[in-house]
Amino acid sequence: MIAIIDYGMGNLHSVSKAVERLGHTAEVTGDPERILAADGAILPGVGAFGDAMVHLRESGLNETVVQFAASGKPLLGICLGMQLLFSGSEEHGQHEGLGLLPGQVVRFQGSYKVPHMGWNKLVYTQESPLLAGIEEGHVYFVHSYHAKPENDGDLLAVTDYHQPVTAIVGRGNVYGMQFHPEKSGPIGMRLLDNFLKLG
């Protein structure tokens, strides 16, 4: 069973349906025991970083996510969920994140259009089981802030939006995708399928 972590912010339904289309059982839940018992967990997210961390802390699910990551079972953050894995964010003030990946989430700076919205090509920066057998291709992004990992070894793929932008991260059993794999056509679904096969 794959737990889709429900903390009040995220495309829970679309992620759940995508997991089920790939032949896995998905359960949308905010119950720590159910999450910790799952074979894998997905942390979705849409909205502001600070609000999301308030929801996670008030529900106690911040500790559940960290505990799940420590179990060695695969954990995937999607969009805002990926950003929450990092040390912190400057979105509407300074906010502390889950601290599973060292680095900060910062706003796009420049005269170009923000948010970054649309289809952009992935460029892989190193090999990973998450990327196995999948050619570089276009996936769907919607975000105004982007993650800057401290360690190059945590960066699995970038895209270009007036600068290299973190697209996929991974450290051990903890992964993140800035884009929405469930909305990114065949490549997004194959990436999600690779994650589900890690469990």
Image (tube, grey):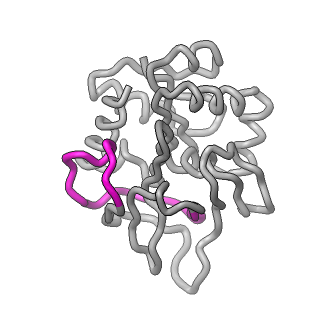
Task: Judge by depth and name the residue closer to the eye, 145 or 103.
Answer: 103
Task: Judge by depth and name the residue closer to the eye, 49 or 153.
Answer: 153
Answer with the quarter of the image where residue 102 lies.
bottom right
Find out whether residue 131 is within the magenta segment: yes
Where 185 sits versus 141, above or below? above
Quadrant of the drawing holding the N terminus: top left
Residue at (77, 34) in percent of width and height: 57
Left or right: where 6 falls relative to 19 = right
Quadrant of the drawing holding the C terminus: top left
Q: How many marks?
A: 0
Left or right: where 167 falls relative to 28 = left
Find out whether residue 40 is within the magenta segment: no
Residue at (39, 67) in percent of width and height: 159
Let me know if residue 147 appears in the view.
Answer: no
Instruction: Tell me where the magenta segment starts and ends, as one range.
Output: 126-148
Residue at (28, 27) in percent of width and height: 21
Return the x and y of residue 176 as percentages of the image width and height. 48, 47
Return the x and y of residue 174 as percentages of the image width and height. 50, 40
